[in-house]
């Protein structure tokens, strides 16, 4: 059986080997100590390094020689621009970056990514180099901003504005249009968030619009916010409507121009969402919206004064017509309420109110209702005025004659004339002057009193009159002669004068001159009669 026996150690023979192992162990310890010291130095250098961006480094370019002599530790942040052999550059920074042994820039670094380099500056000739012993790689500035936006509170405009302010110098320094547009979009997002938070506060919206104009927000946007402020005010029950109207007129161009929407659908969309539709509209359509908004606010202010019974409907309709004639439906409604109010109170109506009701009924296609209305009104006048007294009789006659002159119903003319005849009979003995005035009224309407009879001008023409026959034979002109008889005797005057009043036409014919006897003939006929039917009612002779 074989047994392993330990061999004695030859100390002398093994001494070189032992020394070699000791030396190796000592070298390993020494190298480990050196690396540890180097790492400590690197860490302490990194922690003590001065932080600079590429822009700040350029601004302090005068200090570069000092930094190089003193081997000042620097930590510079900038954008990767490209490689040159084992070296690389940061955009806009005129310093070549030289990685130290063991410091490697990854191959997949993209142009524009942000690098943070730690090292010391070295001057060689007239050039400067950064001996880089540490490299930190980050995203591009645009990617960094997007990531920070995602982490930020989207409902905190101040946080978004701060991010925009932080990155604006970077975009300016690198003349980075893409980043600048990203920052602009971020500011607009913050601005929109502010607008959303102030949507129910018209004063705050107006302040935001003014701030936006200063901050470079597009005029179309600030105008939309001002419009929104007015819309919010118009919905507030506590708003000062007078001031609102003044502000509306001073701020909204086109408020006073009747500029209709191209179609009803566009108008309805606007009325449903004024602010949203205004935001999308061009300048021309915004002017249309200004007018339509004014139309709504003004009509609301006018209509709130419309009484429930419609008694002031005509006044309200007149105001609407003057200020917002587009409100045809509301104008018609106010007029209709007034008509209904008056139709329930026909006996109380004045002449003007009666005339207004007839016009409104006609305009609304209800003309047929007026005959009964007028009949009711006249019956009320009969009841009120026909008391057997002279004054009441004359007033009632006047009402009937007004109705005839306005609406040309002969029955009303006959009723008025009959009342005047009765009034004359009543006044003839008791008040001769009144009777004379009444007779003049009748004569103007083609009636006269002859031989205790009432006769029309036509009746007089039919009667044989000796005085007229005698006058014709003697070539004289007397009252009662017809136009043709006067012409037969005297011929036509050189300058006849015609006077039209009421339902009669009067003519004044003058013969002779101031140096001889002069004859003045007054003729009268109904406006509805032919000129040949005129009759002399007065003849004056004298110088």
Image (cartoon, grey):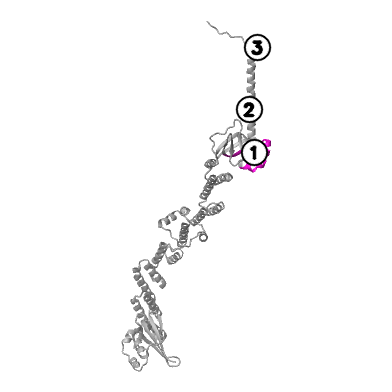
The spot of residue 321 in percent (x, y) is: 44, 65
Q: Nearer the viewer, residue 499 or 415?
A: 499
**Is the residue under label 2 in contact with that under label 3 (CB below 8 Å)?**
no
Left/right placement of residue 119 relative to residue 326 reads right
Magenta stretch bounds: 55-80
Q: Nearer the viewer, residue 145 or 28?
A: 28
Q: Quarter of the image holding residue 501?
A: bottom left
Q: Is residue 38 visible?
A: yes
Q: Nearer the viewer, residue 76 or 444?
A: 76
Q: How many C-alpha atoms fall within 10 Å of the one at disc 1: few (<14), some, or many (≥20)?
A: few
Q: Nearer the viewer, mark 1 or mark 3?
A: 1
Residue 399 among magenta residues: no
Q: On the rendered image, what quadrant is the C terminus found in? A: bottom left
Q: What residue sits right under mark 2 in the picture? A: 36
- Check disc 2 and report its element: helix, strand or loop: helix
Q: How many C-alpha atoms fall within 10 Å of the one at disc 2: few (<14), some, or many (≥20)?
A: few
Q: Residue at x 57, y 8 (%)?
A: 5
In the rendered structure, find residue 127 and report the number of the disc placed on it.
1
User: In the rendered structure, which disc, 1 or 3, sits on the residue that comes first in sequence?
Assistant: 3
The spot of residue 357 in percent (x, y) is: 39, 69
Q: What residue sits right under mark 3 in the picture? A: 12
């Amino acid at each position: 059986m074989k047994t392993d026996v330990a061999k004695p150690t030859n100390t002398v023979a093994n001494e070189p080997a032992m020394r070699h192992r000791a030396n190796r162990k000592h070298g390993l310890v020494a190298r480990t100590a050196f690396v540890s010291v180097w790492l400590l130095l690197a860490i302490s250098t990194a922690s003590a390094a001065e932080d600079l961006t590429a822009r700040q480094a350029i601004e302090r370019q005068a200090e570069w020689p000092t930094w190089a002599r003193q081997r000042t530790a620097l930590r510079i942040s900038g954008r990767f621009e490209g490689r040159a052999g084992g070296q690389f550059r940061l955009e806009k920074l005129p310093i070549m970056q030289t990685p130290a042994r063991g410091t490697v820039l990854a191959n997949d670094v993209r142009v524009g990514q942000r690098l943070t380099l730690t090292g010391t500056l070295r001057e060689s000739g007239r050039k400067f180099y950064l001996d880089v012993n540490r490299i930190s790689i980050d995203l591009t500035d645009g990617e960094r901003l997007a990531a920070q936006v995602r982490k930020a509170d989207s409902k905190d405009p101040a946080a978004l504005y701060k991010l925009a302010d932080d990155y604006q110098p970077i975009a300016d320094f690198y003349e980075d249009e893409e980043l600048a547009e990203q920052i602009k979009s971020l500011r607009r997002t913050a601005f929109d968030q502010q607008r959303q938070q102030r949507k129910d506060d018209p004063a705050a919206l107006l302040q935001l619009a003014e701030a936006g104009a200063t901050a470079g927000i597009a005029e179309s946007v600030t105008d939309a916010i001002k419009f929104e402020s007015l819309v919010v005010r118009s919905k507030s029950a506590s708003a000062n409507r007078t001031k609102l109207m003044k502000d509306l007129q001073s701020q909204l161009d086109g408020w006073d121009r009747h500029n209709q929407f191209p179609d009803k659908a566009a108008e309805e969309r606007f009325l449903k969402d004024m602010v949203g539709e205004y935001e999308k509209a061009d300048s021309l359509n915004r002017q249309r919206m200004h007018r339509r908004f004014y139309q709504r606010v003004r009509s609301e202010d006018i209509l709130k004064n419309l009484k429930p019974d419609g008694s002031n409907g005509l006044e309200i309709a007149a105001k609407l017509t003057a200020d917002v004639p587009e409100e045809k439906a509301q104008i018609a409604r106010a007029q209709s309420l007034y008509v209904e109010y008056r139709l329930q109170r026909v006996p109380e109506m004045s002449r003007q109110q009666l005339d207004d009701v007839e016009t409104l009924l006609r305009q609304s296609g209800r003309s047929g209702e007026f005959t009964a209305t007028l009949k009711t009104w006249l019956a009320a006048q009969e009841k009120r005025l026909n008391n057997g007294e002279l004054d009441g009789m004359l007033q009632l006659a006047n009402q009937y004659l007004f109705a005839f002159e306005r609406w040309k119903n002969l029955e009303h003319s006959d009723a008025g004339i009959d009342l005047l005849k009765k009034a004359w009979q009543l006044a003839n003995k008791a008040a001769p002057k009144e009777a004379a005035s009444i007779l003049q009224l009748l004569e103007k309407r083609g009636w006269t009193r002859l031989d205790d009879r009432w006769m029309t001008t036509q009746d007089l023409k039919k009667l044989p009159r000796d005085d007229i026959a005698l006058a014709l034979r003697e070539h004289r002109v007397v009252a009662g002669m017809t136009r043709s008889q006067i012409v037969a005797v005297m011929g036509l005057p050189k300058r006849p004068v015609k006077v039209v009043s009421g339902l009669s036409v009067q003519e004044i014919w003058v013969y002779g001159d101031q140096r001889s006897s002069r004859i003045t003939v007054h003729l009268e006929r109904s406006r509805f009669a032919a000129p040949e039917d005129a009759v002399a009612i007065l003849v004056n002779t004298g110088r």
